[in-house]
Image (tube, rainbow, N blue to C red):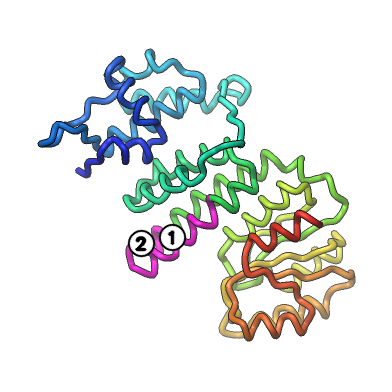
Amino acid sequence: MQYFNIQLASQLSGVASATIRAWEKRYKAVIPERGDNKHRLYSETDIEKLALLYKLTELGQSIGKIAPLSFEELKDVYLRLMHRPYEERHAVVTSSENIDTEKMLSGFFLALSAYKLDIISHELEKACKILSPKDLCLKILIPLFQEIGHKILRQELSIAQEHTLSALVKFYIGQMIGKNYQKALQKNKLILITTPEGEWHEVGILASALLCVHYGVRFVYLGANLPAESLAEAANALKPHVILMGTTRFELTSQFDLNDYLSVIKNSLEVNAEIWLGGNLNAFHRTELEKKKIHFFSSLEKLDQVLSEF
């Protein structure tokens, strides 16, 4: 079993070091091992329990009452609470001002290095609760997935692990979009958001939807892997101002590339909608897109700037 010092335990669990010591001393919440130097060493189970205790205190539970419970008993309490109506959970809403996102991100990276899904899930839930959609997108999701990409290249993470992490992220982003969607009805212009057929990577367009929520831009989220004919049909019916697509490659399938896909859309469109494209394409392909009057965004930061003036 892997052990962590109190600083790492704090970052992984989300509980301040001073709070861990207090919960240990007053309530025997966890009883860490001691190293040869007498310093505290926390097991993975200790950290999972601390993270769950933190969740429950955020939901209004008294630490004095729940600290003596076993990890399984705490999970039962948490599940019962989460089945209550939202208003009854007494969730603590924290101001998004002055939040240390660097510290929050370091917690994600530590959990990612140990592939601790429970802790990653906890951190995502906390981030969605206390950060604005824009800060979640630009300060957490972008650097998190950049780090995931680096770990895959260094063979520190497998593709299966990437898919698991992506599924977790998509779940929490979807929840945040749903919770805030009514705020995205302030502007008359409409954006359709999707990825081309053959492109299954969805995190980028979900992040784009978060930015739309933040700026009150109306949007319809069409999901990933949408055939060109279906996208044109939706656009002709909904009459958007912009069609926003995300892609990670130019060659979409063995049979057609991005140029083919865009040609079908343009030939099928009956409305005057701008086409925006974001993703990871080389300079040659970007130049070709610009010749076709396609607005290309090489980063979500650039999309953020445009949406802020939309």
Tell me if label 1 and label 2 are in contact, CB under 8 Å: yes
Left-right relation of 26 to 126:
left
Position of the N terminus by quadrant: top left
The range drawn in magenta is 140-162
Residue at x 28%, y 22% (from the top left corner): 24
Relative to 69, say whether 38 is above or below. below
Does dot 1 land on a helix, a strand or a loop?
A: helix
How many labels sit on residues?
2
Question: Residue type at mark 1?
Answer: Ile
Say if residue 111 shows up in the picture: yes
Disc 1 target residue: 148
Residue 59 position, x and y percent, is: 51, 23
Residue at x 43%, y 22% (from the top left corner): 77
Among numbered discs 1 and 2, the one appearing first in the sequence: 1
Does dot 2 land on a helix, a strand or a loop?
A: loop
Residue 82 position, x and y percent, is: 52, 28
